[in-house]
Amino acid sequence: MKLTNSIGSILQIIADHPRSAPKNNYNNSFYALSFSTINEQKVDFSIFKGKKVLLVNTASKCGFTPQFAGLEQLYQKYKDALMIVGFPSDNFASQEFHTNKEIQKFCTINYGVTFLMMKRSDVKGKHKNPVFQWLTDQSANGWNTQEPTWNFCKYLISEDGHLISYFPSKIKPMSRKITKQLDLK
Protein backbone atom coordinates (compact mmCIF):
# COMPACT_ATOMS: atom_id res chain seq x y z
CA MET A 1 0.00 0.00 0.00
CA LYS A 2 2.88 2.38 0.83
CA LEU A 3 4.36 1.90 -2.64
CA THR A 4 1.03 2.62 -4.30
CA ASN A 5 0.62 5.81 -2.27
CA SER A 6 4.18 7.00 -3.05
CA ILE A 7 3.86 6.31 -6.76
CA GLY A 8 0.43 7.92 -6.74
CA SER A 9 1.91 11.02 -5.10
CA ILE A 10 4.70 11.23 -7.68
CA LEU A 11 2.27 10.74 -10.55
CA GLN A 12 -0.03 13.41 -9.10
CA ILE A 13 2.90 15.87 -9.01
CA ILE A 14 3.59 15.02 -12.65
CA ALA A 15 -0.08 15.44 -13.62
CA ASP A 16 -0.43 18.74 -11.74
CA HIS A 17 2.73 20.31 -13.14
CA PRO A 18 2.23 22.70 -16.04
CA ARG A 19 3.74 21.41 -19.30
CA SER A 20 4.85 24.89 -20.36
CA ALA A 21 7.17 25.64 -17.43
CA PRO A 22 9.63 28.44 -18.20
CA LYS A 23 13.12 27.36 -19.29
CA ASN A 24 16.34 28.30 -17.50
CA ASN A 25 18.45 31.12 -18.90
CA TYR A 26 21.30 28.83 -19.97
CA ASN A 27 21.54 26.54 -22.98
CA ASN A 28 21.18 22.77 -22.82
CA SER A 29 19.17 22.84 -19.61
CA PHE A 30 18.56 19.71 -17.55
CA TYR A 31 15.04 21.05 -17.08
CA ALA A 32 14.39 20.90 -20.83
CA LEU A 33 14.68 17.09 -20.68
CA SER A 34 11.81 14.64 -20.36
CA PHE A 35 11.49 10.88 -20.27
CA SER A 36 8.84 8.22 -19.71
CA THR A 37 8.35 6.35 -16.46
CA ILE A 38 8.31 2.59 -16.17
CA ASN A 39 4.50 2.96 -16.57
CA GLU A 40 4.91 5.00 -19.78
CA GLN A 41 3.95 8.39 -18.31
CA LYS A 42 6.02 11.27 -19.66
CA VAL A 43 7.90 13.27 -17.01
CA ASP A 44 8.99 16.83 -17.77
CA PHE A 45 12.19 17.32 -15.76
CA SER A 46 11.22 20.91 -14.97
CA ILE A 47 9.15 19.40 -12.12
CA PHE A 48 12.46 18.74 -10.33
CA LYS A 49 13.33 22.45 -10.00
CA GLY A 50 14.34 23.30 -6.46
CA LYS A 51 15.37 19.73 -5.55
CA LYS A 52 18.58 17.81 -6.03
CA VAL A 53 18.21 14.86 -8.38
CA LEU A 54 20.22 11.64 -8.26
CA LEU A 55 20.05 9.75 -11.56
CA VAL A 56 21.15 6.11 -11.46
CA ASN A 57 21.46 3.48 -14.17
CA THR A 58 20.07 0.31 -12.63
CA ALA A 59 19.90 -3.43 -13.33
CA SER A 60 17.95 -6.16 -11.57
CA LYS A 61 20.49 -9.00 -11.84
CA CYS A 62 23.81 -7.36 -10.94
CA GLY A 63 26.19 -7.65 -8.01
CA PHE A 64 25.34 -4.01 -7.25
CA THR A 65 21.56 -4.63 -7.33
CA PRO A 66 21.35 -4.56 -3.48
CA GLN A 67 22.05 -0.82 -3.85
CA PHE A 68 18.31 -0.50 -4.53
CA ALA A 69 17.88 -0.81 -0.74
CA GLY A 70 20.37 2.01 -0.14
CA LEU A 71 18.76 4.17 -2.81
CA GLU A 72 15.36 3.69 -1.16
CA GLN A 73 16.88 4.53 2.25
CA LEU A 74 18.49 7.66 0.79
CA TYR A 75 15.21 8.66 -0.83
CA GLN A 76 13.22 8.20 2.37
CA LYS A 77 15.74 10.26 4.36
CA TYR A 78 16.02 13.17 1.92
CA LYS A 79 12.80 13.04 -0.15
CA ASP A 80 11.81 16.60 0.79
CA ALA A 81 14.93 17.88 -0.98
CA LEU A 82 15.92 15.00 -3.30
CA MET A 83 14.45 13.03 -6.18
CA ILE A 84 16.00 9.73 -7.14
CA VAL A 85 15.41 8.60 -10.69
CA GLY A 86 16.32 5.06 -11.72
CA PHE A 87 17.03 4.20 -15.35
CA PRO A 88 16.89 0.43 -15.88
CA SER A 89 19.30 -0.64 -18.58
CA ASP A 90 20.61 -3.83 -20.11
CA ASN A 91 23.88 -2.31 -21.35
CA PHE A 92 26.10 -4.40 -19.10
CA ALA A 93 26.23 -8.21 -19.39
CA SER A 94 22.48 -8.74 -19.94
CA GLN A 95 21.65 -8.05 -16.29
CA GLU A 96 18.20 -6.51 -16.74
CA PHE A 97 14.79 -8.03 -17.36
CA HIS A 98 13.29 -7.61 -20.82
CA THR A 99 10.07 -5.81 -19.87
CA ASN A 100 9.25 -2.79 -17.74
CA LYS A 101 6.60 -4.85 -15.96
CA GLU A 102 9.19 -7.45 -14.86
CA ILE A 103 11.55 -4.69 -13.69
CA GLN A 104 8.86 -2.90 -11.72
CA LYS A 105 7.70 -6.12 -10.06
CA PHE A 106 11.26 -7.05 -9.11
CA CYS A 107 12.04 -3.61 -7.63
CA THR A 108 8.78 -3.48 -5.70
CA ILE A 109 8.81 -6.99 -4.27
CA ASN A 110 12.52 -7.23 -3.46
CA TYR A 111 13.42 -3.67 -2.45
CA GLY A 112 10.18 -1.75 -1.87
CA VAL A 113 11.28 0.92 -4.35
CA THR A 114 9.13 4.05 -4.14
CA PHE A 115 11.43 6.48 -5.95
CA LEU A 116 10.82 7.23 -9.61
CA MET A 117 11.76 4.49 -12.06
CA MET A 118 11.90 5.21 -15.76
CA LYS A 119 11.31 2.83 -18.66
CA ARG A 120 14.09 0.47 -19.72
CA SER A 121 16.54 2.18 -22.08
CA ASP A 122 20.18 2.39 -23.11
CA VAL A 123 22.48 4.56 -20.99
CA LYS A 124 25.55 4.30 -23.21
CA GLY A 125 26.45 3.74 -26.82
CA LYS A 126 24.82 4.90 -30.02
CA HIS A 127 21.25 4.34 -28.72
CA LYS A 128 21.83 6.14 -25.41
CA ASN A 129 18.67 7.81 -24.10
CA PRO A 130 18.51 11.66 -24.20
CA VAL A 131 18.99 12.02 -20.43
CA PHE A 132 22.25 10.08 -20.46
CA GLN A 133 23.27 11.92 -23.62
CA TRP A 134 22.98 15.15 -21.59
CA LEU A 135 24.75 13.64 -18.56
CA THR A 136 27.75 12.57 -20.65
CA ASP A 137 28.06 15.47 -23.09
CA GLN A 138 30.37 18.18 -21.77
CA SER A 139 28.91 20.77 -24.16
CA ALA A 140 25.47 20.13 -22.64
CA ASN A 141 26.21 19.61 -18.93
CA GLY A 142 29.27 21.85 -18.60
CA TRP A 143 32.01 19.39 -17.60
CA ASN A 144 31.29 15.66 -17.65
CA THR A 145 31.98 13.11 -20.39
CA GLN A 146 31.94 10.00 -18.16
CA GLU A 147 29.47 7.37 -19.37
CA PRO A 148 28.37 4.71 -16.90
CA THR A 149 31.13 2.13 -16.58
CA TRP A 150 28.77 -0.46 -15.10
CA ASN A 151 25.34 -0.62 -13.45
CA PHE A 152 24.54 1.75 -10.56
CA CYS A 153 26.64 4.73 -11.59
CA LYS A 154 25.18 7.90 -10.10
CA TYR A 155 24.90 11.49 -11.33
CA LEU A 156 23.88 14.29 -8.97
CA ILE A 157 22.07 17.38 -10.22
CA SER A 158 21.88 20.56 -8.11
CA GLU A 159 18.66 22.36 -7.16
CA ASP A 160 19.20 24.72 -10.08
CA GLY A 161 19.74 22.02 -12.71
CA HIS A 162 23.52 21.77 -12.90
CA LEU A 163 25.37 18.45 -12.94
CA ILE A 164 27.54 18.61 -9.83
CA SER A 165 28.88 15.07 -9.26
CA TYR A 166 29.46 11.66 -10.76
CA PHE A 167 29.82 8.56 -8.57
CA PRO A 168 30.94 5.17 -9.92
CA SER A 169 29.08 1.95 -9.09
CA LYS A 170 31.20 1.10 -6.05
CA ILE A 171 30.05 4.25 -4.21
CA LYS A 172 27.05 3.15 -2.15
CA PRO A 173 23.99 5.43 -2.01
CA MET A 174 24.30 6.11 1.73
CA SER A 175 28.06 6.77 1.54
CA ARG A 176 29.32 10.01 3.04
CA LYS A 177 30.55 11.05 -0.43
CA ILE A 178 26.91 11.35 -1.48
CA THR A 179 25.16 12.31 1.75
CA LYS A 180 27.53 15.21 2.46
CA GLN A 181 26.22 16.81 -0.74
CA LEU A 182 22.63 16.36 0.46
CA ASP A 183 22.90 17.41 4.09
CA LEU A 184 21.28 20.78 4.53
CA LYS A 185 23.30 23.24 6.58
Image (tube, rainbow, N blue to C red):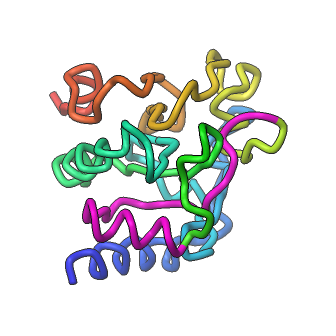
> x, y percentage for residue 20?
68, 66
Q: Is residue 92 magenta?
A: no
Q: Is residue 115 magenta?
A: yes
> x, y percentage for residue 177?
27, 20
**Which of 164 and 172 lies nearest the eye of the viewer?**
172
Q: Quadrant of the C terminus?
A: top left
> x, y percentage for residue 85?
46, 51
Above or below 135: residue 79: below
Q: Quadrant of the N terminus?
A: bottom left
Q: Residue furthest top?
A: 143
Q: As drawn, is 128 to the left or to the right of 96? A: right
Q: Residue furthest right?
A: 126
Q: As drawn, is 20 to the left or to the right of 181? A: right
> x, y percentage for residue 113?
31, 62
Q: How many marks?
A: 0
Q: Residue at x 50, y 36 (%)?
A: 151
Residue 127 sits in quarter = top right
Q: Residue at x 53, y 47 (%)?
A: 95
Q: As drawn, is 185 to the left or to the right of 100? A: left
Q: Residue at x 29, y 45 (%)?
A: 66
Q: Residue at x 65, y 27 (%)?
A: 141
**Which of 158 and 66 lies nearest the eye of the viewer?**
66
Above or below 123: residue 2: below
What is the magenta range? 101-125
